[in-house]
Image (spheres, rainbow, N blue to C red):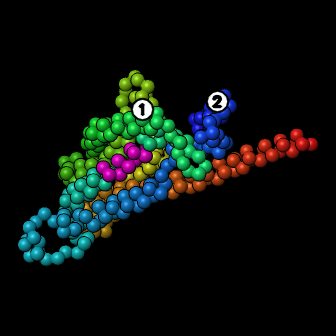
Amino acid sequence: MAIQKVKAAKGNAKSSPAASPSQPPRNDADVVTANASFPFARYTSIVGVHTSLLAFTALILPRSSFADLSSPSEARSKPRKDPMTMLTENPARTLAWICFGCFVLQLWWAGWVREWRLEATLPPIPKTEDGKFIESETQKAERVMKQEEWNRQKANDNGFAVLATLAASVAYHVVLILFGAHSTSYVLQTYLLSLVLALLTIYAPVYALGLPTFKGDTESLVRRLTWVRLFAELAPRTPVERALVYPAVGTVLGCWSGVIPIGLDWDRPWQAWPLTPAWGAIGGYVLGSLLALGVSNVKEVIDLGVAARRDDELSKKPSKKGKKKNQ
């Protein structure tokens, strides 16, 4: 797209009449096209904040004074407990606060991911080598219209994401029972773990990509194939897609790994169901987010190096032709 626009600009420059004295002719060779580059600096900072707050949600929030719903006088009269006891004495309360923290954080994180994905679909803005954008009024109007349309769809997309998360939590609950969780006891704890998994794996993808449907129109088909490519084939191509796929895979693997300590005969309070799977899920999500950040940054550096080498090769070709003509 960017190469075609530059070629079209060169063709228009050849066919257009001479520029007026008040507007000196602009050399089209000095114009480059700014593709929709991914904001890696902002992405890095947001991932750092997001993962840090998830760790806070898993280990600090459930044992904070804010999580104690008793009155201040009752809280002062109670003996002070160590942090691990506060986390493990009531697993259902701990999981409930983890669900609350994950919902707030995923709501914030999904908004950023959705914005980055939609910005990547906008047409590139041409700019000169000195960094000045030359976006036309038509392009500005089109960009504003699309952004307004996205803002109008926020409420609907958020509603679909919430419904999909609740439906996925029920599906996760069934899967956990099939994998050995108690079907009649610890029902609340098992469902809260299912809700944590759904919040970490379903909410952000549905809010950013849209809910896949089986409609026959082109948009629904593309969306459905995108979901298959990302979460069935595990083949993300962009930083946004990696930011959705890697944490989801890490969440599932972390939850599965977190079940292992429960089977050990150590008889420790932190082995209570389902604390270790929940902590493992959050730990896997954090590692997946950091891995997605690292892979995307490394790939961006490699792509920039390849592009710079290609530009150097293209800049050397005219000089070789000139030498042949002189000979």
The quarter of the picture where residue 63 lies is bottom left
Amino acid identity at mark 2: Ser
151 to 95, vertically: above or below: above
Amino acid identity at mark 1: Arg
Work out how far the residue at label 2 is from the one at label 1, CA to CA, in angstroms: 45 Å
Where is residue 293? Give x, y as percent.
Answer: 48, 55
Q: Which sits in the foreground, 202 or 173?
A: 202
- What residue did someone put label 2 on? 16
Q: Which residues are magenta?
A: 107-117
Q: Which sits in the foreground, 313 or 62?
A: 313
160 to 274, vertically: above or below: above
Mark yes or no: residue 275 visible. Answer: yes
Q: Please give the name of the residue rendered at 78% of the width and 43% of the height, measured from the top-left corner.
A: 318
Disc marking residue 94: none
- What residue did someone put label 1 on? 224
Q: Please give the name of the residue rendered at 27% of the width and 49% of the height, measured from the top-left corner.
A: 195
- Within 10 Å of disc 1 (Cα), the crowding (few <14, some 14-19, many 20+) is some
Q: Is residue 141 one of those drawn in magenta?
A: no
Where is residue 19? Give x, y as percent.
Answer: 63, 35
The quarter of the picture where residue 57 lies is bottom left
Question: In which quadrant is the N terminus drawn?
Answer: top right
